[in-house]
Amino acid sequence: MRRQIIRLVPWITGLALAVGVTWIDQAWAYEAWVTNQEDHTVIVIDTETNKVIDTITPGGKKPHNIAFSPDGVHAFIANAGSNDVSMVDVKTRKLVGTLPAGTRAHGPAVSPDGRQLWVANPGSNDVTVIDLEGRHTIDTIAVGKAPALVVFDPKGVRAYVTNGGSGDLSVIDVKSRKIVTTIEAGRGAMGTDVTWDGKLLLVTAGDVDQIDVIHLMNHQVAARIAREGEPHGLVISPDGKHAYVANRKASVVSVIDCKALKIVKDIPAGKRIDIVTITPDGRRLYVTSRDTNSVIVIDTLTDKIVAEIPTGKDPHGIAILPASHH
């Protein structure tokens, strides 16, 4: 048996290298969904061609941010103008339900088990928790001032809510839906993401021009990274090596080394860029550029812009759906 295993190793290694080369040379195809606030629409972009393949009118006013269910069956679009969430069937791209939220519904997030939708409401300073099977509200959690986004740790045990008005993070136990602690994070706290191993959380604080790095084991601040130009949207690469930050006023995407905890590069992109997302293979960044009514596409291997895609008026939120789910 040992000799058989030894003989197979070169073949397996060769196959892995071949697959690796294929991955490097060709990115997988995904869909990028983008909200256009002034048009009250959502566009769908094919990331293989970087072309708009559909325009959806889900019915809400001022669609702001988007989240997908873990199984890729539904999209949830938070509507800041109508204080609700549009539930859209991804395959048909049709509205299948409207879920009530709080005032100025901003950031939706689906729990990792797919059972609940949490919506941050900056106008009512709370988070709406919705049971997705029954499609009804099961809780409203009072948090800090002007909550913007919700992210979960990989296991779905904790939820983290960025409160831009009070400059902090509410840490919530998902099961009890109780706040367990509050972490100071700087005014304008907004864009946030958690590394795949659940060890670090990064959050932008645009009002004080910084990005905070927080250890999730002890909720202590590991670093505060200065970045002038109003850092806003943020996403961490799937491998956890880099974070990418959209800076509104500076109109650059900053690349953060998550090990060194410092900015290693700035990539000029768009004008008043807002939300940034990354494809699951880590190959492409997609950034909404509000003043140019477009989405900027950046290759993460070269840090170069490879496309600019026209959108509707005032593009804001953006999220990636793997095409295999469509």
Image (spheres, rainbow, N blue to C red):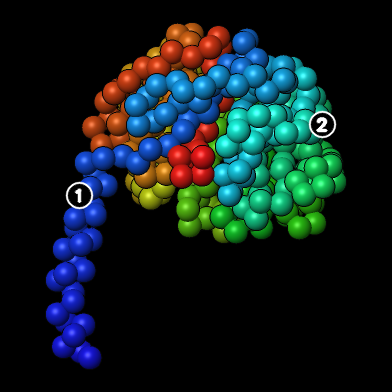
Q: Is residue 32 visible?
A: yes
Disc number placed over residue 100 in the picture, else none:
2
Compared to residue 127, the image places residue 238 above or below, namely below
Residue pictured at 45% horizontal, 8% vertical: 292
Q: Position of residue 150 (x, y in %)?
A: 65, 40
| Residue pointed to by mark 1 | 21
Q: Secondary structure at mark 1?
A: helix
Which of the pair 176/20 is nearer the observer? 20
Q: Is residue 72 left or right of residue 97?
A: left
View extreme (bottom): residue: 1
Residue pictured at 63% horizontal, 10% vertical: 38
Which of the pair 265/110 is nearer the observer? 110
N-terminal label among 2 and 1: 1
Compared to residue 43, the image places residue 303 above or below, namely below
Q: Is residue 275 left or right of residue 122?
A: left
Q: Quadrant of residue 110?
A: top right
